Amino acid sequence: MMNSAFRNVHITASRLINPNPIASSILHFLPLYSGEAAPRRSTPLHRRNAVIPSFSALFCSSSSSSVYIPMAGGGDQVLPPSSHSLEKQFESFRVQLEESAALREQIRAVVMEIESATRLIQANLLLVHQSRPIPEVIEKAKEKITDLKQFYARLAEILQKCPGQYYRYHGDWRSETQAVVSQLAFMHWLETGTLLVHTEAEEKLGLNSLEFGLETEDYLTGICFMSNDLPRYVVNRVTAGDYDCPRKVMNFLTDLHAAFRMLNLRNDFLRKKFDSMKYDLRRVEEVYYDVKIRGLISGGDPPAVQGQS
């Protein structure tokens, strides 16, 4: 009873002297001993000299620490070395992407001119389906070949700014080049009745296989595009009274189809265009047999067509 009363008096006095609730709560759990209940014990020598931290030192030691904690939004933040290297890396990426975008803009401007010239050539060649004189049609279409050669020369000059990056930007003019090869091959066949070979196509466009050349796949795809125009040409020529045209076109497509079958083509766009060639050949064969059965032409049997897969 006496110890309990003494504890209450001590707590009340401590609250009056120090109203801090934290300190009061800590003092509340400190053991109180009376002089009679707690006899003094001898303290060892090594514990007498020990330094006991004070209450204020326990709660204020963190304020005297030398650890620097950066605050959000502070102007005096010190970035770690990794942040500097990361910023430097992405700055170089930004410069590369901007230079690449500017280069693509220059390429695209030239490609649009190539596309425009190709459309004009195609528009002129469409006149052969209207029984116009072939030399006249070809002569007018050839006027744009000089422009195409100049456009490809400009493309070569642009790519000289980024040596070794030809295949990185090749897709920007691939489809336009395939269309150009198609029109050149059609013109060449109308003049000679033979296939425009790869080296001749490069020469007509002023290309150099060592620096800026004509890709093999682009050439082959353009030849496949050219074969798509031949069935319509055959039908229109027969309608105009040229009954020998189906035989000539059939012989040409038969040899061309056999040559393509020598290639081990993958299941890609070129393979699909090659598959369309056999349908072009089949349409020409139907016209030839129709004309042959009607007795409009005379001659030997047509050449055997190889099996189509």
Image: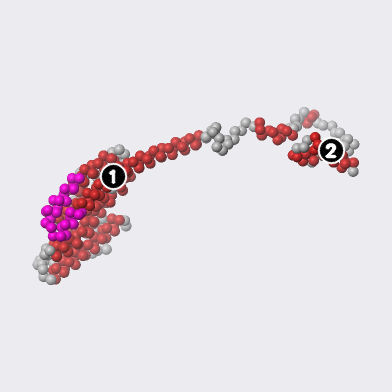
- Quadrant in which the N terminus appears: top right
Task: Give the residue number, with chain letter if any, for mark 2.
Answer: 10
Picture quarter containing residue 153? top left
Inspect the image, locate mark 1, and give the three-letter code of the amino acid beneath it.
Answer: Ala
Residue shown at 28%/49% (left/top)? 174
Inspect the image, locate mark 2, and give the three-letter code of the amino acid beneath it.
Answer: His
Residue 146 on the magenta span: yes
Element carrying mark 1:
helix
* Left or right for 302, reference 55: left
Residue 221 on the magenta span: no
Task: Give the residue number, with chain letter if any, for mark 1.
Answer: 109
- Quadrant in which the C terminus appears: bottom left
* Left or right for 105, reference 297: right
* Left or right for 22, reference 108: right
Asked if residue 265 can be seen in this view, the reply is no
Residue 145, position as x, y percentages in the image: 18, 47
Residue shown at 20%/54% (left/top)? 123
Residue shown at 12%/56% (left/top)? 134
Residue bounds of the magenta highlight: 122-147
Picture quarter containing residue 66? top right
Q: 254 and 158: which one is in front?
A: 158
Residue 122, position as x, y percentages in the image: 20, 54
Q: Give neighbour class at mark 2: few <14, some 14-19, many 20+ (Cα, 10 Å).
A: some
